Amino acid sequence: MEQAAPQEAAGDQREIVSFRVAGQDFCIDIRYVREIRGWSPTTVLPHAPDYVVGLMNLRGNVIPVIDLSLRLGLGRSEPSQRHVIVITNDGRGTVGLLVDSVSDIMSVPCDELKQPPDVATSHAPAFLEGVFTVDEKLIRVLDLAKAVPSNRAVEE
């Protein structure tokens, strides 16, 4: 079941966590972020989609870790100590997102969310809810329901 995008009245603020993936700025709604962890090696999951880096043990729970760069069509990440795993849960299950770094936690006006241009140069536009402009920089808002499959889909 897909989670609906947050609906706020005009003038409301939206809390987001921004991060970098393959030199690009993205963000997700802060209510989906459970924690942010440094990179640690994962356990390979045989026959998983190529964007699944592996599994990690999070306080007794086994969760998949997704290479967000590869998932968005921006190339494979080579995980290192500088990478970060953003632990998310949008109601469909807990998933880790491998990103280059977390940039900021900020409030942005909901009415400033713009629709992304309709271009088919990569998979990323299909996974976007919209874009915000913050300090002359475009930050793409990920639609987690589209970008991140549920745990069941990852494990099949």
Image (spheres, rainbow, N blue to C red):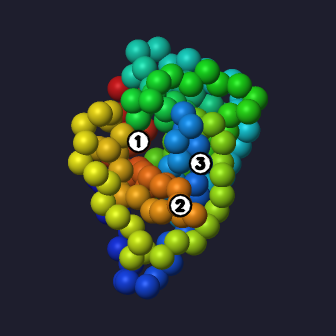
Q: What is the secondary structure assignment of the residue under circle 1?
A: loop
Q: Quadrant of residue 15?
A: bottom right
Residue 34: where, in percent of width, then height?
61, 55
Mark closest to the chain's N terminus, 3 or 1? 3
Q: Name the image quarter holding residue 85.
A: top right
Query: Residue 116 location in percent, x, y?
Result: 32, 54
Amino acid under disc 3: Phe
Residue at image mark 3? 19
Query: Which residue position is annotated with label 1?
Result: 148
Mark 3 or mark 2: which comes first in sequence? Answer: 3
Mark 2, residue position: 136
Please state if 79 lies on the left or on the right of 119 as rendered: right
Res. 61 image quadrant: top right
Query: Which secondary structure, mark 2?
Result: loop
Q: Nearer the viewer, residue 87 or 143?
A: 143
Q: Amino acid at mark 2?
A: Glu
